[in-house]
Amino acid sequence: MSAKSLSTWCRGELDELLGDVSMLVRHESPSGEKALLDRTADSIMAWLDRRLGAPDHWTRHDHAEHGDLLEVTYSGATGAPVLMIGHYDTVWPSGTLDGWPFAVRADGTATGPGIYDMKAGLVTGVWAVLALRAFDLPCPTVRFLFNGDEELGSPKSRPHIERAAQDCLAALVLEPGVGWDVKTERKGVGIFTVTTHGVEAHAGNNPTDGASAVHALAEIVHQLTREADHDRGTTINVGTISGGTARNVIAGQASCLIDIRVSEQAEAERIDRVFAALRASDPRVRVRVDGRWSRPPMRLGPASRTLFDLANDVATALRAPLDPISVGGGSDANFVSALGLPVLDGLGASGGGAHARHEHVVVDDIPDRVALVAGLLSRLADEPRGQRHPQDG
């Protein structure tokens, strides 16, 4: 059975596929609204049961403030599972759907909040399993992880993702693709706040009595931004600045929020040393750094290269060869990659406009994307049974 036959079958089921995408989009699931996230998770469990039947194992990892993590396993041809990861939380606040409903447009795209990032990706993964079943083709044991706090950096889900990946043949991440291509490298992400604490004083009557937190922060912003190294993939963006209380008061406090992206772990360690050495020129001003590296860099190591080559074989027979794409954003794939395990990202829908009002997926590409994932799953099931790829080292 060829991947093209799988795509043809999916094309015949396209209305059903789009119905599933529509159902998920119509469940608003902003990262910060627990009640809506819980209702979406309930619907996902019911949808999985309807499409794939009762799972062999499932656990709903409850998170008090964030969206729950759904861990759902369907047994197949391999002992060791293939992990498929996706998130159902979105950046869109509740009520967005009122002015921007799901729609299939005349230009061949479908739109709606969260459709590209990444609810169509969840549908891609589930229908890939369904397509293999339709033709009685070998499918490995599949362990789905559907995550409700990814847009926040997966603070509660990360330990579960790292645990669940340990015994897997490979991890396939259903984030959106880049055209036909997939993502093999992602930058590490750091989110930090720098706060300066100065000494307040009257700016006119007692200027030398004060030590301005705002002035000190301006110095520090300059110190930090000059540490960017674009040749090595390190970017530093000061996104917001706040501080002071009035025009004629020497500021007692100021802060800035910083986004840092790195392509190499060594660069993250270098930036940590930069933070540790930060000082204001006025010794009366204290400098405090809060934050963390929310995601380590994802690199294309030997194990992931082997997985990419398998996917490329399927893609070439189906439509066209794949390019391994490196992107600046992070995902849950970063966590798996940091463990040295084989992982491939960007296997979800093609389209564009993530986190923007023109978010959309290309409808005609959906069957091919499902067939690509299905074909890769089938290839993994045909690998020497139960054998893991060697870890990157």
Image (tube, rainbow, N blue to C red):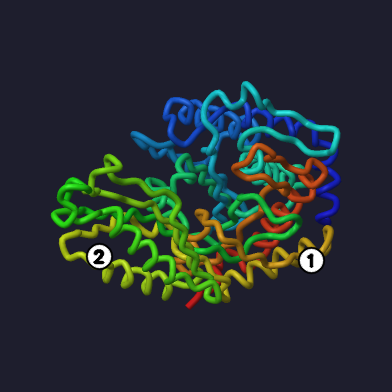
Residue 44 placement (x, y as % from top left): 56, 32
* Mark 1 or 2, nearer chain start: 2
Residue 135 placement (x, y as % from top left): 78, 46
Residue 85 placement (x, y as % from top left): 55, 50
* Front residue (pair 320, 71): 320
Q: Amino acid at mark 1?
A: Pro
- Residue at 49%, 44% (x, y): give it: 151
Q: Report the side of 345 relative to 255 (left or right).
A: right
- Residue at 52%, 58% (x, y): give it: 333
Is residue 166 something that shows in the picture?
Answer: no
- Residue at 54%, 55% (x, y): give it: 81
* Front residue (pair 32, 34): 32
Number of the label disc, if any, that sits on residue 321 = 1
Number of the label disc, if any, that sits on residue 280 = 2
- Residue at 62%, 54% (x, y): give it: 140
* Front residue (pair 115, 229): 229
